[in-house]
Amino acid sequence: MKSQLWGLYVREVLRVFRNPFVVLVTLVQPFMWLAFFGSSFNNLAAASGKFGSGSYFAFLLPGTLSTSMLSVGMFGSMSAIQDKRFGFMKRILITPTSKQTIFLSKALGAATRGLIQVPVMIVAALVFGVSFPLSPIEWVGWIAALFLLAFGFSSLFLAVTAPATDWQTPGVVANFITMPLMFASAALFPSSSFPPWMQAISNVNPITFSAELGRSFLLGTTVDWWNLGYLAAFASLMLVVGYSISARWLKVE
C-alpha cells in the first residue's frame, strides 16, 4: 500500500507542474488577490481602526492563505472527477490499489499543492510592507495549520465527489459550500462586525481558526495554540468521513 500511495501522491503533486498555465495561475492568483483586495480596503481599514496596529495587508494575508486552502480542497475534488471522466480511475481500481489509497493520495496531494502558494504570498506581502516577526516554532505552527486546513477541505470535497457519477454535481455542491464558508469567517474582516447568525458560523468555521492563528503571529497578539488543535480535530474528522465514504461508495460510473 505504501508504494501505491506514494506513486499516486507523486502523480497528484506533479500533475500541476505539467501545465505551465496552471502553474502560472496557481502562483499569480493569490498575489493578485492580496494586491487588489488589500489595496482596495487598506485605507478604509486604517480609518476604521478595527484591524489591529498593522496594515490591512498584514491582517488579510493569513485570511487569504486560509481561503486559498479552501479552494485547494475544491480543486482537489476536480482531480477525482477528471480521473473518472477519462478512465484513469477505472484502470487504477483494476489493480490491487484500494479505494482508500486513492482517497488518501488525492487529499495529501491537494494539501501539498496548496502549500506551494505560501512562499508566493509571503513575497507578495513583503512587497506591500508586511514584516514577519515569527519564531521558527511559529512558522512551523502556521504551515501546519494551513496544511491541516487544506487536508480537511480536500477530504470533505473528495467525500462529496466519491459517490457521484454525474461530473457536474460535485462542482455545484463545492461552489455552494465555498461562498458561505469564505465570507462567514474572520478571513477578510473581523467577525465582531458580523450579525449574530454569521458570528455563530464564524465561531465554528475552520477558516476562522486558521486565519486568527496566522494573524496572531503577524500582528503580535496573544497566540491561541488551541486553534491548531481545532484544525487538527477538523482534519481528523474529515479524514474519517472521506476515508469511510470512499471505501464504501467510490464509483467510477
Image: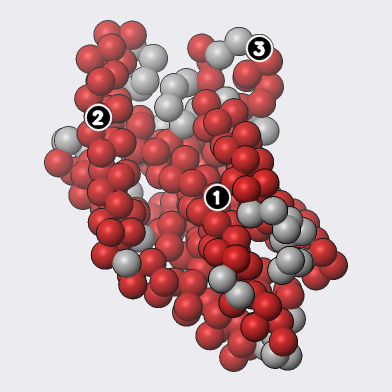
Q: Is residue 149 above or below residue 210?
A: below
Amino acid on which the number 1 mark rests in the picture: Met
Q: Residue at x 70, y 90 (%)?
A: 95
Cα–Cα gap, marks 1 and 2: 23 Å
Q: Residue at x 58, y 38 (%)?
A: 175
Q: Residue at x 30, y 52 (%)?
A: 25
Q: Quadrant of residue 143?
A: bottom left
Cα–Cα gap, marks 1 and 3: 28 Å
Mark 3 neighbour class, 10 Å CA radius: few under 14, some 14 to 19, many 20 or more: few
Residue 84 in percent (x, y) is at 63, 67
Residue 156 in percent (x, y) is at 67, 52
**SS under mark 1:** helix
- Colour setup of the view: secondary structure
Residue 23 in percent (x, y) is at 30, 61
Q: Is residue 244 above or below residue 142?
A: below
Q: Residue at x 25, y 29 (%)?
A: 36
Mark 2 neighbour class, 10 Å CA radius: few under 14, some 14 to 19, many 20 or more: few
Task: Please name which of the two marks, 1 or 3, marks the residue nearer to the observer.
Answer: 1
User: Which quarter of the figure is the N terminus placed in?
Assistant: bottom right
Residue picked out by circle 2: 36
Seen from the viewer's position, the closer of residues 31 and 47 is 31
Cα–Cα gap, marks 2 and 3: 29 Å
Task: Please name which of the two marks, 2 or 3, marks the residue nearer to the observer.
Answer: 2
Residue picked out by circle 3: 196
Residue picked out by circle 1: 74
Q: Dots 1 and 3: beta carbons under 8 Å?
A: no
User: Which quarter of the figure is the C terminus placed in?
Assistant: bottom right
Which numbered disc, 1 or 2, marks the residue that appears first in the sequence? 2
Q: Is residue 10 above or below residue 84?
A: below
